[in-house]
Amino acid sequence: MDVTFATWFRLLAVVALVWIWLRLWQWILIFVVAIFLAVALDPAVRWLDERGLKRRFGGPLVVLALAALIAGFFAISGAQLKQQAGMLGDRISEAREQISDWVPEPVREMLSGASGGAQGAGASQSPGGSGAGTLAAQAVRAVVSGIASILVAFVLTMYLLLDGRRTFEWFVAFAPPPQRPRIKETAEEARIAVIGYMRGNVATSVLAAIVTFIFLISLEVPAALLLALLAGILNFVPVIGLLLSLVPAVLLALTVSPGAAIAVAAFYLGYNAIENYYIQPKVYGHEMQLSSLAVLAAFAAGAELGGVIGALIALPIAAMYPPIESLWLKGRLPANAVEEHRKIEASEEH
């Protein structure tokens, strides 16, 4: 069996790429997020450039404006959120007491005994509260790591806005000259897909926050603003994001009445189903020409491969397939396959 040098070289290249991915996959994902942010913010930089503010000033200005907008929002609403967060802790304690009152006495004693035994075991295993200290240290590290990742993403976004086009042209120069027009056309289609995804994600999250706030206010659930903001922020996590905010909402509603808690649980579950199977597929499908099944499959695959960030970037990556199919795979697919796919995508139902 004769194995050529080129075959060995390809095999080593694949192994090297796998090793690099395993070592740097978190930073690669952050870089991809920075690319998406730069593409989404580029229309604003172009708009400023057309009105006399050069890109070298407009790029940093747009990134700093976005960061200031986020920081300003939390600063303005910080006092109210702090007050409502304290109310959240108080009401959760009240809900815990109410639940404890509903539990029969034998069950309560059994749970209390089990809890006391577990606390004793925990104290013997971690004297001096070392377990709590470890958890606190892990939480601090996670917060610091998250802030550092956000700062790195913003810095990379700024540099991509300033020099991203020249960097792209530099990489395109490695390709054979006949392939360069197709590469540039593919990149343009990818840019359109990313912008569509950003618009869709912001629209669905804002809608979720507004609808949740109106519903919670109508039931007089405490800390409605905090819960609505939590629902909107977590809604950026595809498919299951809204469900992550369900528990505190139900606990607070339980302090109003058991019926309010049931209504809140039904609302969150119902709205999550409507959003996943109707709103998001319609929004993302319209913006990026993806079927409902493709949207859900991209969410699931991205979350499995890259966690939250993978789920966030999976849709625009999946939306790049139609132009890749048209520009790169047309000659390798059965006759009329691409045309039939375009007709299906243009139909009323995918």
Image (cartoon, rainbow, N blue to C red):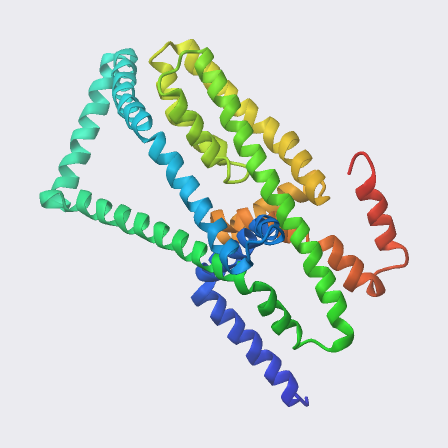
**Near-viewer residue (311 or 84):** 84
Q: What residue occupies the far left of the structure in this picture?
A: 128
Q: Position of residue 196 (x, y in %)?
A: 65, 44
Residue pictured at 65% horizontal, 54% vertical: 191
Q: Position of residue 224 (x, y in %)?
A: 40, 20
Quadrant of the frame with the C terminus: top right
Is residue 245 at least partly visible in the picture? no
**Near-viewer residue (317 or 83):** 83
Residue 131 falls in which quadrant of the image? Answer: top left
Q: Position of residue 118 (x, y in %)?
A: 19, 35
User: In screen coordinates, is 251 left or right of 347?
Assistant: left
User: In screen coordinates, is 349 left or right of 20?
Assistant: right
Q: Position of residue 36 (x, y in %)?
A: 56, 53
Q: What residue occupies the far front of the structure in this picture?
A: 52
User: In screen coordinates, is 90 left or right of 288?
Assistant: left
Residue 292 vertical placement versus 86 (above, below): below
Residue 5 vertical placement versus 277 (above, below): below
Q: How many marks?
A: 0
Is residue 310 at least partly visible in the picture? yes
Residue pictured at 66% horizontal, 89% vertical: 4
Residue 332 falls in which quadrant of the image? Answer: bottom right
**Near-viewer residue (335 or 203):** 203
Residue 106 vertical placement versus 157 (above, below): above
Residue pictured at 46% horizontal, 11% vertical: 218
